[in-house]
Amino acid sequence: MKCLNWNLEWRPPRSAGGKWIAQKIGELAPDVSCLTEVTEALIPEGEVIRSDLDYGYVNKGDRRKVVLWSKEPWTDIDLVGDSGLPGGRFVSGVTLGIRFIGVCIPWQSAHVSTGRKDRKSWEDHLIYCRGLTGIIEKYRKEDFPVCVLGDYNQRIPRVRQPVEVAEALAACFPSAFSICTAEMNDLEGKPLIDHCAISPGLSARVTEIIPKNTPDGDRVSDHAGVVQEIRQVKLG
C-alpha cells in the first residue's frame, strides 16, 4: 500500500502552498495518510481519525496536530493512547489489516516560552516518549502488525539533540522494529524528522520525498513529506 506522512505546518488551504498540497495528495492517491499540523480544509474526504482539538495552544477550531486518513474504514480506534501523554497529539486505529499509530511528538520548546509556559526544554518530548513506549508495547501484542507514523521531531540517528532524548525515542521501539526513514535526508540534504517505524510482519521502503516548496518557490511546509510503500510479509 502507498502511505503518505506529511507535516503541513498549518498551511492555509487558499495559499499557493495549500493549493499545491491538495493537488499533490490527489495525485499521490495514497491508501493511508498521516497528516500532522493540518487544518480541516486540507484533510481529504475519506475515513479520518482526528486527534483532540486541545493540544495546549490557542486553536480556532480548525487545527489538528495529527490525523490518520484511510481509503477504507477504521476499527479499534484509540484517541488517548495513554492518559499521561501530552494532549491532542495521538491517534490510532486499524485499517487494511495494520494497526497504525499517528504521532506528533512535541518539539524541543513545546510549552517552554509559548503556550502554557510550564515546561523545560525537551520535557514534553520526553513525557511523550515514555508514554509511547507503553502504547507500542501494548499494541505489538495484538494480532495486527504495527506502523508508527508521524512527526517524531528528532533526527535519526542523533545529530544535535541530547543523548537522553535520542535514547528515549529509541526506547519506544522494540528491537525487532525497524525505521525505514532512518539515515535519510530531505531534498535539501537535511535529515528527516518525520518517520515510519514498523513491526515484524511489515516491510517498508521510501519511494518519494516531497519538497518543502512548490516548483514555483512558494512555501509548502518546514517539513519534507515522505511517501512509503508498505507491505505485509509472512513471518518465520
Image (cartoon, rainbow, N blue to C red):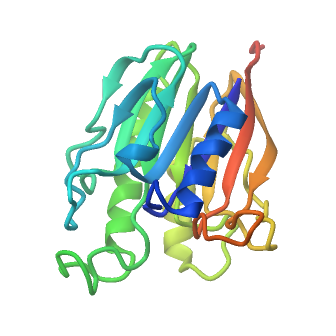
Question: Going 78% across and 61% down the picture, which residue do you hit?
Answer: 183
Residue ranking furthest to the bottom: 113
Location of residue 10 with respect to 131 vertically, above or below: below
Q: Quadrant of residue 146?
A: top right
Location of residue 232 with respect to 89 vertically, above or below: above
Question: Going 32% across and 68% down the picture, which residue do you hit?
Answer: 124
Q: Quadrant of residue 76?
A: top left
Quadrant where the image shows the C terminus: top right
Foreground: 7 or 218? 218
Location of residue 228 with respect to 109 vertically, above or below: above
Foreground: 145 or 37? 37
Direction from residue 148 to residue 85 in the image, left or right? left
- Residue 22 shows in the view: yes
Where is residue 161? Give x, y as percent.
Answer: 56, 79
Quadrant where the image shows the N terminus: top right
Question: Going 22% across and 49% down the picture, which residue do you hit?
Answer: 53
Direction from residue 192 to residue 164 in the image, left or right? left
Where is residue 72? Give x, y as percent.
Answer: 51, 14
Question: Going 48% across and 34% down the picture, which residue do you hit?
Answer: 44
Where is residue 112? Give x, y as percent.
Answer: 28, 82
Where is residue 126? Give x, y as percent.
Answer: 38, 65
Foreground: 82 or 236? 82
Foreground: 59 or 140? 59
